[in-house]
Image (spheres, rainbow, N blue to C red):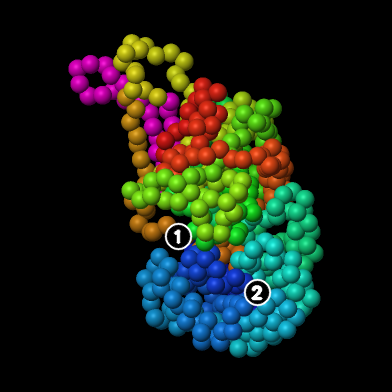
Amino acid sequence: MTLINPLRDPRDRRLPRLPEPCALVLFGVTGDLACNKLIPAIYDLANRGLLPPSFALVGFSRRGWTDGEFTKFVRDAAEKGARTPFREEVWNRLAAGMRCVSGSFNDEAFDRLAQALSDLEHTHGIPGNAAFYLSIPPSAFPAVLKQIQRTGMASNEVSGGWRRVVVEKPFGFDQKSARSLNELVDEVFTPAGVFRIDHYLGKETVQNLSVMRFANPLFEGIWNSRFVDSVQITIAENVGIGSRAAFYDGIGAARDVYQNHLLQLLVSTAMEKPVSFNAEAIRSEKLKVLRAVSLPADLRSYAVRGQYEQGWLAGQRVRGYLEEDGVPSDSKTETYAAVRLGVETRRWAGVPFYLRTGKRLPRKVTEIALLFKPASHLPFDATNTTGLGLNQLVVRVQPDEGVTLKFGSKVPGSAMEVRDVAMDVLFGEAFTEALPEAYERLILDVLLGDATLFPSNDEVIESWRIVDPVEDLWSGSAPCRYRAGRWGPPTADEMLARDGRRWRRP
């Protein structure tokens, strides 16, 4: 029997929401994502008191680990990557629920996994609730999903609780493969139990976009084509591909970032106000934006791809992409992509959206910049406004999360000189609580069954509709070269210059 606190309003989100007793099965537990993000996020959730007392972490590994060896591995990753202080009492509670199942993707290993989940019902009081996190290459999804289906681990009826699956991006390789993968996932799990994760949607700054717009008439009133000249969305990385050559060289920047992160930031910027703040209403508005996205008629002039060459970053010489370990010497994979899109809605018709992403750029930064139209008339002499540019509203997603408003102001002195100034709001300074990592929020939402921050199947399919023509255009062609440490190839600057604009320098 479930006890309900009569003094607590379930709509009050100020009080923490705790999942039911459950297990999280983590595939790919030794990978970079699990070590650097997922395991630290799980510990931080436990440290913040947001996991149920009866919680189990089950690792599936090809290494022949015992439970103790797995627990030590998890502890090392948590101590290294956790953002909250490491506390022994928290760790001991979390470690008591850790199990490891070793083996490859064969019948025997998955039979042991099914038995381990069944045993947790008796040892930890977990009534059949489990989420499966597929932190593995997309090529391995079918094998794992079919094994989960064969053993009945995906069935809510068989387990007596809820069963969910988390699928990492990229979700498919193109629209056709995404449809096939969606059909397989929906065949194994219920549609409501599928969580397609895009960690950018878990970032506090992205979530704050809706609040900034819909809770503040100051911003919503100018958030349209009447005032906005253009929108620039940038995801820049200063690192190369590291040890991901085997994965990245078959994917490239467009499939790795443009199809998911960049388009999700676009829809978060361009969506209309939902009728209510729940998963169904928000997904509906986001899907409308994706369906309204248009590609330029002259796509060849407004879709640029690049590949970094050796150069200098932070005072150090770095290798070019073709010199990276594991990259074929004749690879045509792009490490930079820039595209102009339109959004054919009443609010945004005529406003170009410029999206760019790249590796080995001067700095790591993700931002959404709204550049506003110039004043229709300036009463000042032209010589007084040479330092005045376009007003800008910049949402910094990472790092230094916050908002910058750039506008003209008089320079102190006897002369009338107008120059741009910036007003900054840093979330880390405005709020006393440290910003949680995106994966903390997303893992918690999976365990709660809240799909608000997760793209739907239809969103994934529409995203590929936008990306596939660009990939077809680039197929077989060589990317433009750019030196590491610069903001992409010259053709990307020429793309904006063709429209009488230029890239904002983050």
Q: Is residue 298 visible?
A: yes
Q: What residue type is labelled 2?
A: Ala
Quadrant hosting residue 88 = bottom left
Vertical relation: 352 (above or below) 311: above
User: Can residue 278 be found in the magenta stretch?
Assistant: no
Spot the residue most to the left: 414
Q: What element carries label 2?
A: strand
Q: Which mark is residue 33?
A: none
Mark 2 and mark 1 lie on one chain; the one further toward the N terminus is 2
**Residues packed near mark 1 inside 10 Å, few (<14), some (14 to 19) or many (20 plus):** some
- Residue 487, position as x, y percentages in the image: 45, 39
- Residue 205, position as x, y percentages in the image: 47, 49
- Residue 253, position as x, y percentages in the image: 58, 47
At x 51% / y 25%, what residue is drawn?
A: 497
Q: Which amino acid does label 1 sit on?
A: Pro
Q: What element carries label 1?
A: loop
User: Can residue 413 be found in the magenta stretch?
Assistant: yes
Is 81 in front, or is 298?
Answer: 298
At x 73% / y 53%, what residue is drawn?
A: 178
Q: Residue 436 carries which label?
A: 1
Q: In this view, does 110 lie to the left or right of 415?
A: right
- Residue 369, position as x, y percentages in the image: 48, 36
Q: Which mark is residue 130?
A: 2
Please state the extent of the stretch shown in magenta in the rendering. Answer: 390-418
